Image (cartoon, rainbow, N blue to C red):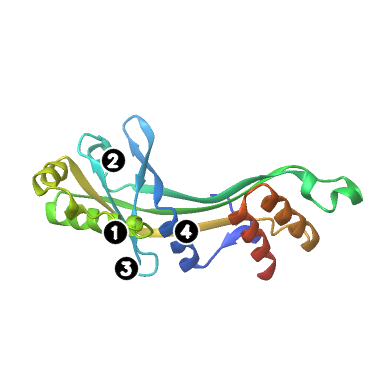
Amino acid sequence: MYIPRQFEEPNIEVMHELIRAQPLATLVTLNANGLEANHIPLALSTEPVPYGVLSGHLARSNPLWQEHPADTDVLVIFHGAESYITPSWYASKAESGKVVPTWNYVSVQAKGKLRVIHDINWIRAQLESLTAHNEAGFDHPWAVSDAPQEFTSKLLEAIVGIEIVITDLKGKWKVSQNRSAQDRSSVANGLINHGHYEMAELVKSSGESL
């Protein structure tokens, strides 16, 4: 991933926070037909350090787990807030007119080797952990144990577990750091007016780290 210096996010914990908040990953793998992408929710464990490990599960009928070469890295992509930035928001537009549109976004890319796991106990624990994480914000969180055991046992037989020990982690926070304080302020206001509150906060906070 191309990352100009001003957009690089070096803080591992910040990248981990995005992964936890946006667990639906794009998992890019290689098979005999070339590259393939699958969208899979993944759970993050911060051990082993420094980057941690990702875990999830696939339908057993998904050929990914059989076709990807065991000694080849996979690429895992997580996306955070994103928004189109119109040049009309820039305060400097009135001064020179030398402004163009752009797109602000936040992204994390992880690399590592894919390990396939068939152990039913491991898969059940992974399902329970992933479910608990994503149900945490609900008034009446659902748990795997809420479903009939016979039903979940059949489902467990139909999936395989996957684990990716992260060997490389990169974050790109393109949130108007290359603009003046005046432009960042006007962009944040424009984003707020259009309901893009998360990106507005990122643009505001980008000035604090400069």
210 versus 94 height, above or below:
below
**Furthest residue toward left:** 150
* Mark in front: 4 vs 3: 4
Distance between the alpha carbons at the discs numbered 4 and 1: 18 Å
Closer to the N terminus: mark 2 or mark 3?
3
Can residue 210 be seen here? no
* CA neighbours of label 3 inside 10 A, class few (<14), some (14 to 19), many (20+): few
Q: Residue 123 — which label?
A: none
Q: Are marks 2 and 3 in contact (CB under 8 Å)?
A: no
Q: Which residue is mark 4?
A: 18
Disc 1 marks a residue whose amino acid type is Ala
Q: Which residue is mark 1?
A: 132
* Mark in front: 2 vs 3: 3
Closer to the N terminus: mark 4 or mark 3?
4
Number of numbered callouts drawn: 4
Distance between the alpha carbons at the discs numbered 4 and 2: 27 Å
Q: Relative to the observer, which residue lies in front, 89 or 142?
A: 142
Quadrant (top left/top right/bottom left/bottom right) for the C terminus:
bottom right
Residue 59 on image: x %, y %: 23, 39
Disc 4 marks a residue whose amino acid type is Leu
Q: Relative to the observer, which residue lies in front, 138 or 100?
A: 138
81 versus 52 height, above or below:
above
What SS does tag 3 mark?
A: loop
* Mark in front: 4 vs 1: 1
Q: Which residue is mark 3?
A: 48
Closer to the N terminus: mark 4 or mark 1?
4
Q: Residue at x 34, y 52 (%)?
A: 42
- Based on the displayed image, in which of its 4 quarters is residue 65 positioned? top left
* CA neighbours of label 4 inside 10 A, class few (<14), some (14 to 19), many (20+): some
Q: Residue 68 — which label?
A: 2
